[in-house]
Image: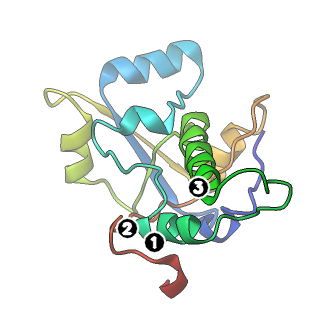
Amino acid sequence: MYESHPELLARQPPDETVLWRYMDTAKFFAIVESKTLFFPRVTTFQQQDPFEGHPPRAFINRLKANPPSMVGQETRSHEELIKGDLENLAGLRRLVCVSCWHANVGESAAMWSLYSSAGEGIALRTTFAGLRDAVRGTEKSVSGGLVQYVDFDKYDERFN
């Protein structure tokens, strides 16, 4: 089922936003055969991008300076609280699964070269509303939003 997540609501694109999913033919036939989309864990992208799904350094630094809550945690040291919070963040990355689509009005030569092997591939085209409607009947909860790629070391969400 599709559920608007409060953290993604501001990043949810308009219904008419055109989305593309580029893949090699083997992945396409797997989708057709299984009638399912594959949602790999965010952590599987670490080879291509070790920062995928990580909060920016400024967030981590603020967390280290001020752990969210020490109520009921008086027996734990500041360092133990920070370590626990960072472990929780890492654990969340193992729980989040994604299906990556490219938002663009037309096809992208760069996406073709990245995601199709040996010049053979398929590009699925839909809209955000179409993708959202396609997952409405599933038993798992699915939410969607646009990804914002930022410089891990320089980005500070307080200024954006």
Closer to the camera in the image, 150 or 61: 61
Callout 1, which amino acid? Ala
Name the residue rendered at 54%, 72% in the picture: 62
Q: Report crowding for label 3: few under 14, some 14 to 19, many 20 or more residues within 10 A (C-alpha).
A: some
Callout 2, which amino acid? Val
Name the residue rendered at 54%, 83% in the picture: 158
Residue that carries the numbered disc 3 in the rendered image: 82
Q: Quadrant of residue 151?
A: bottom left
Lateral position of residue 3 relative to residue 60, left or right: right
Callout 3, which amino acid? Ile
Q: Report crowding for label 1: few under 14, some 14 to 19, many 20 or more residues within 10 A (C-alpha).
A: some
Mark 2 or mark 3: which comes first in sequence? 3
Q: Secondary structure at mark 1?
A: helix
Q: CA distance from mark 1 to mark 2?
A: 12 Å
Image: 101 above or below 141: below
Q: Nearer the viewer, mark 1 or mark 2?
A: 1
Residue that carries the numbered disc 1 in the rendered image: 58
Closer to the camera in the image, 98 or 128: 98
Residue at the farthest top position: 33
Q: Secondary structure at mark 3?
A: helix
Q: Percent x, y for residue 116? A: 24, 33
Image: 84 above or below 56: above
